Image (tube, rainbow, N blue to C red):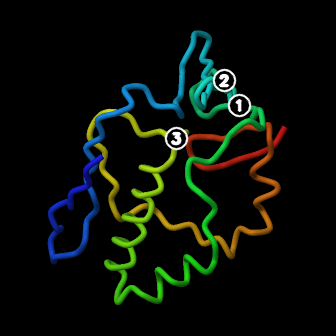
């Protein structure tokens, strides 16, 4: 996998990385779709999530199997503080995190990367974790429903 920098956007801000990945041809973490609005997420030969899209295509009912293994190692508070403290501005911080994440993806064996061109870009929506800590156990059950509009409920 060879990372290369995206051209800077207007104003010279850091924009992201382009990854040219040669192997594997088939990702070990992947979504598979079947008839009847069904889908599943596999990680290698393990089924890690089952889902069924709602009839009106407004969301999906899901059930996790408990067999998922993150392709990214746990991130410690010390790592996060170090990357922030050693970055002179927001662009440097974004670039450092993207390079770190790219390294983890390269080293991981159960991840989503497969042959092709990938773009890891700055600018994902922010989610203020401090305002949502208390909701995490409620909105992230092993079974439930998630709409495509971000509303979640269990059951």
Query: Residue 90 in the image: x percent, y percent?
Result: 37, 81
Q: Identify the residue at horizontal 80%, vertical 68% (top origin).
A: 134
Give the residue at mark 1: 61
Give the residue at mark 3: 109
- Distance from Cα at disc 3 to Cα at disc 1: 28 Å
Q: Which image quadrant for residue 51?
A: top right
Q: Between residue 138 and residue 103, name the one nearer to us.
A: 103
Q: Between residue 33 and residue 28, name the one nearer to us.
A: 28
The mark closer to the camera, 2 or 3, is 3
CB under 8 Å between callouts 2 and 3?
A: no
User: Looking at the picture, does residue 93 appear above or below residue 21?
Assistant: below
Give the residue at mark 2: 52
CB under 8 Å between callouts 1 and 2?
A: yes
Q: Between residue 107 and residue 74, name the one nearer to us.
A: 107
The mark closer to the camera, 3 or 1, is 3
Label 3 or label 1, whichever comes before in sequence order: 1
Q: Which image quadrant for residue 46?
A: top right
Q: Between residue 64 and residue 54, name the one nearer to us.
A: 64
Which type of secondary structure does the marked residue at label 2 adopt?
Answer: strand
Query: Residue 94 in the image: x percent, y percent?
Result: 38, 72
Label 1 or label 2, whichever comes before in sequence order: 2
Query: Callout 1 environment at 10 Å: few (<14), some (14 to 19), or many (20+)?
Result: some
Query: Callout 3 environment at 10 Å: few (<14), some (14 to 19), or many (20+)?
Result: some
- Distance from Cα at disc 2 to Cα at disc 3: 27 Å
Q: Identify the residue at horizontal 84%, vertical 37% (top origin).
A: 155
Which type of secondary structure does the marked residue at label 3 adopt?
Answer: loop
Which type of secondary structure does the marked residue at label 1 adopt?
Answer: strand
CB under 8 Å between callouts 3 and 1?
A: no
């Amino acid at each position: 996998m060879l990372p290369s920098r995206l051209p800077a956007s207007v104003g010279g801000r850091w924009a992201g990385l382009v990854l040219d990945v040669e192997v594997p041809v088939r990702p070990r973490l992947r979504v598979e779709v079947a008839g009847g609005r069904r889908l599943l997420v596999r990680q290698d030969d393990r089924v890690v999530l089952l889902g069924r899209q709602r009839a009106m295509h407004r969301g999906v009912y899901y059930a996790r199997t408990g067999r998922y293994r993150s392709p990214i190692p746990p991130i410690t508070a010390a790592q996060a503080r170090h990357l922030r403290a050693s970055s002179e501005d927001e662009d440097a911080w974004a670039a450092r995190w993207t390079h770190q994440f790219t390294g983890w993806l390269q080293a991981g064996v159960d991840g989503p990367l497969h042959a092709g061109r990938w773009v890891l870009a700055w600018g994902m929506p922010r989610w203020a974790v401090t305002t949502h800590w208390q909701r995490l156990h409620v909105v992230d059950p092993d079974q439930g429903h998630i709409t495509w509009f971000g509303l979640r409920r269990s059951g």
